């Protein structure tokens, strides 16, 4: 299967005009052509800045969220069409921080994925279990339930999504899933995708996220069903992010 890996940085709510410029210039120093697909999912106020600085390079722009609605009285939200206006190629949906702090449900996440797809934006659908759920042996059931909602609403269009397995206990904690732990969940997700989108399942990229860094990226990315990474903290440091990109050929 020739499928390019995808390394996506999730800047979360970090950065400012000056630090973004320094980070992007360092990332693009080599000319901005990468062997794998690379994206940075930035805070919305900086889309225009990133779009301008990355113009003509293969660095793609991503959003961290998208509204499920097309337009109207939804204060504070951004529609997929607005993201598209700024050249956004990917939108993270259902990040655990949004599920946890903004009460996002599986159904809402599925609608957000649909809104992104309708605008030609690739949703990066996040799934993952908490530590309590893992300890209770519920990992498989939780991630399957989260992905099932997206499959149910999006049908055969799911061949166009990216999935990110992000165990909640590994996010920002320095505790990475072992390659074997991650691979076993990725295999479960792959099987579920296969059931829903048979011929296309092998082509759907399943990223790992959760304390992925320059030191552990290569062994995670060597697993069969790990097709890239969704990187938080390490994506804010150019040398680290570049090392992860280099590990993803
Ligand atoms: P960290 O890489 O900082 O653990 O964050 C992972 C994440 O949440 C990416 O979306």
Image (cartoon, rainbow, N blue to C red):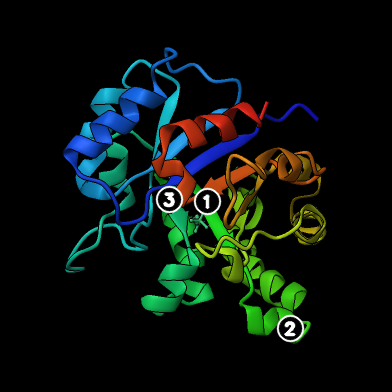
Cβ of mark 3 under 8 A from ligand 1: no
Please indicate, yes or no, whether residue 89 appears anywhere in the rendered image: no
Q: Pinpoint residue 223: horizontal percent, then vertical percent.
A: 80, 44
Q: Residues within 10 Å of mark 1 (few under 14, many from 20)?
A: many
Q: Given the current orientation, which residue lies at the most extreme top position?
A: 31
Of the residues under marks 2 and 1, which one precedes in the sequence?
1
Q: In screen coordinates, is 65 left or right of 170? A: left
Residue carrying label 1: 124
Secondary structure, mark 3, is helix
Residue carrying label 3: 116
In the picture, the quarter occupied by the N terminus is top right
Mark 3, mark 2: which one is toward the viewer? Answer: 2
The Cα–Cα distance between marks 1 and 3, rounded to whole angstroms, is 10 Å
Secondary structure, mark 1, is strand
Q: Pinpoint residue 150: horizontal percent, then vertical percent.
A: 59, 64
State which quadrant residue 227 falls in.
Answer: top right
Secondary structure, mark 2, is helix
Of the residues under marks 3 and 2, which one precedes in the sequence?
3
User: At 71% from the left edge and 70% from the top edge, which residue is drawn?
Assistant: 144
User: At 60% from the left edge and 45% from the top edge, which residue is drawn?
Assistant: 229
Residue carrying label 2: 135
State which quadrant residue 55 falls in.
Answer: top left
User: At 27% from the left edge and 30% from the top edge, which residue is drawn?
Assistant: 22
Of the residues under marks 1 and 3, which one precedes in the sequence?
3
Q: In screen coordinates, is 225 left or right of 125? A: right
The Cα–Cα distance between marks 2 and 1, rounded to whole angstroms, is 26 Å
């Amino acid at each position: 299967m020739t499928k390019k890996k995808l390394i996506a940085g999730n800047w979360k709510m970090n950065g400012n005009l000056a630090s973004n410029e320094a980070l992007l210039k360092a990332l693009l120093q080599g000319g901005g052509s990468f062997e794998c697909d690379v994206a940075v999912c930035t805070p919305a106020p900086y889309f225009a800045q990133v779009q301008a600085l990355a113009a003509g390079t293969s660095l793609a722009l991503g959003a961290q969220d998208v509204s499920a609605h097309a337009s109207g009285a939804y204060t504070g939200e951004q529609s997929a069409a607005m993201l598209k206006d700024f050249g956004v190629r990917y939108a993270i949906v259902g990040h655990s921080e949004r599920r946890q702090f903004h009460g996002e449900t599986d159904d809402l996440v599925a609608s957000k994925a649909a809104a992104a797809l309708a605008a030609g934006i690739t949703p990066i659908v996040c799934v993952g279990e908490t530590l309590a759920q893992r300890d209770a042996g519920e990992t498989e059931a939780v991630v399957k339930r989260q992905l099932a909602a997206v499959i149910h609403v999006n049908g055969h269009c799911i061949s166009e999504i990216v999935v990110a397995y992000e165990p909640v206990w590994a996010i920002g904690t320095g505790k990475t899933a072992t390659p074997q732990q991650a691979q076993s969940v990725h295999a479960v997700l792959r099987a579920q995708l296969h059931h829903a989108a048979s011929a296309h399942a092998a082509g759907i990229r399943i990223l790992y996220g959760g304390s992925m860094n320059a030191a552990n990226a290569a062994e995670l990315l060597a697993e069969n069903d790990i097709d890239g990474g969704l990187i938080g903290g390490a994506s804010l440091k150019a040398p680290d992010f570049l090392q992860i990109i280099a590990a993803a050929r």
